[in-house]
Amino acid sequence: MHEKGRKLIKEAMKRKTIIGLDKECPYFPCHEGLEDCTFCYCPFYPCHEMDTGGFEKLSSITKEPVWACSSCIFPHVRKNAEKILKGLIELDENFDLISRENLLALRKKILKENKKE
């Protein structure tokens, strides 16, 4: 994960609250249907799951496959951002200590909860 993303996630965990929309961001709005910018850098990247709009494509620079999530708004929906933040804090106060497996399990748990709602 990009270091800026790691920093933003850690800040959100420390604040224990989502930030809402960041209308000062030069990329705003970056996604259609955007409700929250807390997880500008998705903690699940790359999830390699197509169920929320992600897909594999060839990098325009390296010509190697990369995971693209420009069509995914999962972490940018307010209720999901709240659940992601709560789940991250429950897993560990230190984002660096949360395993990849636990991150992906959290993602699946939230998606399952959302289907029940």
Image (spheres, rainbow, N blue to C red):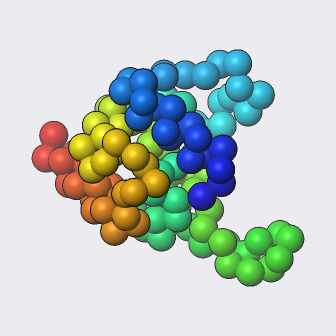
Q: Quadrant of the N terminus?
A: bottom right
Q: Quadrant of residue 51?
A: bottom left
Q: Position of residue 111 (x, y in %)?
A: 27, 52
Q: Position of residue 11 (x, y in %)?
A: 51, 32
Q: Is residue 12 above or below residue 51?
A: above
Q: Quadrant of residue 79?
A: top left
Q: Position of residue 93 (x, y in %)?
A: 34, 42
Question: In front: 49, or 33?
Answer: 49
Q: Position of residue 83 (x, y in %)?
A: 29, 38
Count of labels shown? Answer: 0
Farthest-out residue, left = 116
Q: Residue at x 52, y 59 (%)?
A: 45
Residue 87 appears in the picture as rendered: no
Q: Is residue 111 above or below residue 117?
A: below
Residue 28 appears in the picture as rendered: yes
Residue 100 shown left or right of residue 59 in the figure = left
Farthest-out residue, bottom = 64
Farthest-out residue, top = 24
Residue 34 shown left or right of residue 106 in the figure = right
Q: Quadrant of the C terminus?
A: top left
Q: Residue at x 36, y 27 (%)?
A: 16
Residue 86 shown left or right of residue 20 in the figure = left
Question: In front: 56, or 7?
Answer: 7
Q: Is residue 20 above or below residue 61?
A: above
Q: Residue at x 42, y 24 (%)?
A: 15
Q: Residue at x 65, y 19 (%)?
A: 23
